[in-house]
Amino acid sequence: MSLLFDRGVFTLSLDFELAWGSRDLVADVSPLLDASAVIRREVFPGMVEMMGQLGIVATWATVGHLFLGAARCSQGRLHPGLVPPRHRWRRESWLDGVPAGTERDHPGFYGRSLVTQLRDAGQEIGCHSFSHPIFGDPGCSRLTAETEIAHCISAAQELGIELKSFVYPRNMPGFVDVLAGHGFTCWRCPEPVWYRHPRVPVPVRRAAHLASVAAASCPPTVMPFRDPHGLWCIPASGSYLPYHGLRRAIPISRRVERGIAGIDRAVQDRRVSHFWLHPLNLADEPARMLAGLEQILTHAARQRDAGRLEILSMSALAERAEAISRPVGRSTNLSASAPSVRS
């Protein structure tokens, strides 16, 4: 059954990782730790305040290790119950280099104080695995996926958080049935654009993405759909491009124009604009990148206040999709099936 919305929807999801997102790809994690410090000092408080002022609830897909305030070695290593992946690009043991200790001493690897702020601010806290293995890679076994999810759920429960939304590390899905068996309702899948196809070479993929942002081309609108395991897959529409390396040649204004165009297209199509980003990618030029993001979110809030758009987290969008996909005879009105998220 095709879903039918009575207005556009804007959904924002964030891959919240601090130092975890790229630690397996670098020999020296110092730049990641430096960037994490900028996130803690400038980006995170700025984003939380911005969303609170605009009445926007986003999905903060958080690496589960950030739920912890501290961790100690047991049986000679951290988290002995976690089955590590065996990715071909990393020769070291998966958790080598992750320090035991506290959030105060190692703020790039522990983040309980940040997670509790998100919880208390009414943001949705989703799951981004426990230690950021790549589920879709052959080096990640089913046991790895199962123990990763189990550790996340346990850590979230200690904070009174129920995990419903999942974002796969590096957007590479695998073992979706494991999510279904642990109470998740939705996950994010890649943008429906030609250059995201797995057969497209990585250099071509990156070049095409840069070209689309440079041209401020309108990202696609999407609709959630039910996967074979009964979860709602919510495709991404587009991302907020970082501002480092070659990307600095593209003005931030182009990123803003593209985000706003996606929102307006969602209003026009009565479909979803699902925008996503890594907070860590705002560590370069944080003030300017935050200002650009604020322009996009302010535009979404204005469209919402005009009655043309709803702003829903991933789990709220999944609940909405579930409600309006019910058989005829039950409520199928989009506006009546879930409360507004505006605070």
Image: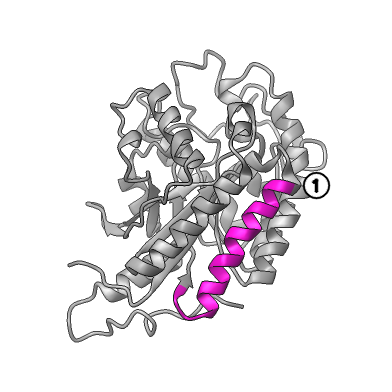
For this view, does 24 lie left or right of residue 264? right
Counting from the top left corner in percent of width and height, residue 180 is at: 33, 53
Whether residue 78 is situated above or below residue 128 in the rendered picture: above
Whether residue 274 is situated above or below residue 21 in the rendered picture: below
Residue behind mark 1: 41
Question: Which residue is painted at 37% across and 65% down in the image?
Answer: 318
301 in the magenta segment: yes
For this view, does 296 lie left or right of residue 335? right
Counting from the top left corner in percent of width and height, residue 23 is at: 61, 27
Counting from the top left corner in percent of width and height, residue 99 is at: 72, 29
Amino acid type of the residue that numbered disc 1 sits on in the rendered structure: Arg
Question: In the rendered structure, which segment of residues is drawn in magenta?
Answer: 288-309
Q: Secondary structure at mark 1?
A: helix
- 10, 73: nearer the viewer: 10
Whether residue 117 is situated above or below residue 247 in the rendered picture: below
Magenta stretch, main secondary structure class = helix
Question: Which residue is painted at 75% across and 55% down in the image?
Answer: 45
